[in-house]
Amino acid sequence: MPTLDKVPVDLMVVLGTTSMPIHQVLRLSRGAIIELDASEADEVKILANNMPIASGVVLVDRNRIAVEVKQMLTRSPDRR
């Protein structure tokens, strides 16, 4: 599998989402707080290259934040 070692994969963890008008987005500054439709206790979605692959939970240990994978999602036949 050495050829797979150099394949880039973008990973994204989504805790929650929100909607806001573009004029509010343009006024955001460093340190702005954006309220989400989820809490830290909710499951997160894990995406690889914008495709959902798993779900998990956020773990906080002192100053470290991690995501524990709880369930791998099954792939549909057309995505194999």
Image (cartoon, grey):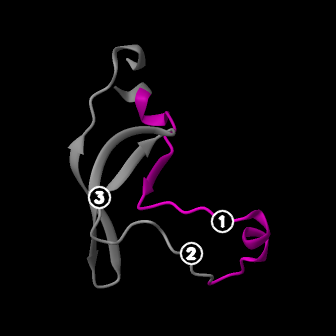
Q: Which of marks 2 and 1 is nearer the N terminus?
A: 1
Query: Picture coordinates of residue 5 (x, y %)?
Result: 42, 35
Q: Taking 19 as reference, is 29 above or below it? A: below
Q: Does the magenta stretch include residue 32?
A: no
Relative to 33, is 23 on the left or the right?
A: right
Relative to 40, is 21 on the left or the right?
A: right
Instruction: Determine which of the numbered discs, if any, sits on residue 43 in the image.
Output: 3
The residue nearer to you, when weighing 77 against 42, is 42
Label 2: few (<14), some (14–19) or many (≥20) C-alpha neighbours in 10 Å: few
Q: Taking 78 as reference, is 55 above or below it? A: below
Distance from Cα at disc 3 to Cα at disc 2: 18 Å
State the residue position of label 2.
34
Q: Which of marks 3 and 1 is nearer the N terminus?
A: 1
Distance from Cα at disc 3 to Cα at disc 1: 23 Å
Three-letter code for the amino acid on which mark 1 is drawn: Met
Three-letter code for the amino acid on which mark 3 is drawn: Glu
Label 1: few (<14), some (14–19) or many (≥20) C-alpha neighbours in 10 Å: few
User: Cβ–Cβ below 8 Å for labels 2 and 1?
Assistant: yes
Q: Quadrant of residue 78?
A: top left
Q: Residue at x 51, y 38 (%)?
A: 49
Query: Picture coordinates of residue 11 (x, y %)?
Result: 46, 48
- Label 2 element class: loop
State the residue position of label 1.
20
**Image quadrant where one finds the N terminus:** top left
